[in-house]
Amino acid sequence: MSILHDLEATIQARKTADPKSSWTAKLLAKGPEKCAEKFGEEAIEAIIEAVKGDREKLASEGADALYHFLVMLAARDVTLDDVLAELSKRQNVSGLDEKAARAKS
């Protein structure tokens, strides 16, 4: 298990928690669209720190983005392993070839 799998398990456990007692439960209770919006906000904050070049803040915002990405996945019942399986399919395939294959479909 990785720390991301551990975090995913925590998020799954919070799906049934009282939204008054858990940020994750509160976010999930607002629905998949709100989870996606929050992920987008966090991704933009990470981009800003990447442009600024602040490694410490980028690491912090990156952690926030990863957390919110997992919450967004959970809101749509997509697992981290689903994402990892997709990455596995792409392993050892040129990014240019993979992108061209997607454009054909």
Image (spheres, grey):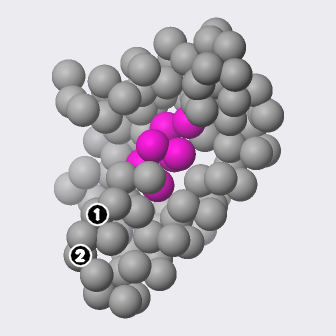
Question: What predominant SS class does the magenta segment belong to?
Answer: helix
Which amino acid type is marked by label 2? Arg
Find disc 2 in the rendering and name its residue: 55
Q: Which residue reaches farthest front?
A: 20
Q: CA distance from mark 1 to mark 2?
A: 6 Å
- Asked whether 11 or 17 is in front, the reply is 17
- Asked whether 63 or 85 is in front, the reply is 63
Q: Is residue 46 left or right of residue 19?
A: left
Quarter of the figure with the C terminus: bottom right
In the picture, the disc for residue 100 is none
Find disc 1 in the rendering and name its residue: 59
Residue found at x 51% / y 71%: 45
- Work out whether 70 lies above or below 50: above
Q: Is residue 76 left or right of residue 86?
A: right
Residue 104 in sight from this viewpoint: no
Task: Indicate the position of residue 18 as horizontal and vertical percent values.
Answer: 68, 14
